[in-house]
Image (cartoon, helix red, strand yellow):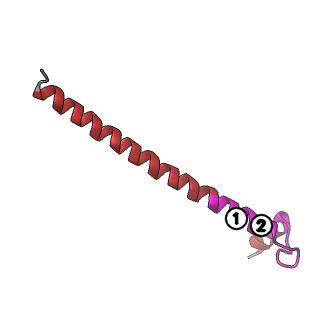
Amino acid sequence: MLTMTYLNRMRKKMKKSSKQIGGAVRLSGQIEKLCNAADNMSQATCSLTPAMDPYSISQAIKVLDSM
């Protein structure tokens, strides 16, 4: 026969595991958003032309330092 203490422990474990699953789903969604943002940034950077981005990194640093 099951005791109330055992049933209470089982309920707590079930609640904990459902929270862990919810956390994993949330984390997965956040990782997906981060990957999409990185892809979008990469595509935007690759599509720049020299006319749009006339400075190299060292030139940009010199311009910023002179400000």
Mark 1 residue element: helix
Q: Nearer the viewer, residue 42 or 7?
A: 7
In x, y percent, where is residue 32? 57, 55
Question: Outermost residue toward the bottom?
Answer: 51
Identify the main secondary structure in magenta: helix
What is the crowding at mark 2: few (fewer than 14 residues within 10 Å), some, or many (at least 20)?
Answer: few
Q: Nearer the viewer, residue 54 or 22?
A: 22
Question: Outermost residue toward the front?
Answer: 1
Q: Quadrant of residue 15?
A: top left
What is the crowding at mark 1: few (fewer than 14 residues within 10 Å), some, or many (at least 20)?
Answer: few
Report which residue position mark 1 lands on. Answer: 41
Q: Is residue 35 left or right of residue 8?
A: right
Q: Within the magenta stretch, is there residue 44?
A: yes
Mark 2 residue element: helix
Compared to residue 19, the image places residue 2 above or below, namely above
Identify which residue is drawn at 80% across, 69% down: 60
Q: Amino acid at mark 1?
A: Met
Q: Amino acid at mark 2?
A: Thr
Q: Quadrant of residue 45?
A: bottom right
In x, y percent, where is residue 66? 77, 74
In x, y percent, where is residue 65? 76, 70
Identify which residue is drawn at 17% across, 32% down: 8
Question: Outermost residue toward the top?
Answer: 1
Q: Nearer the viewer, residue 55 or 18?
A: 18
Disc number for residue 45: 2
Compared to residue 66, the image places residue 12 above or below, namely above
Segment colored magenta: 36-61
Quarter holding the C terminus is: bottom right
Q: Is residue 59 left or right of residue 9?
A: right
Q: Nearer the viewer, residue 7 or 12?
A: 7
In x, y percent, where is residue 53? 83, 74
**Label 1–label 2 contact, CB within 8 A:** yes
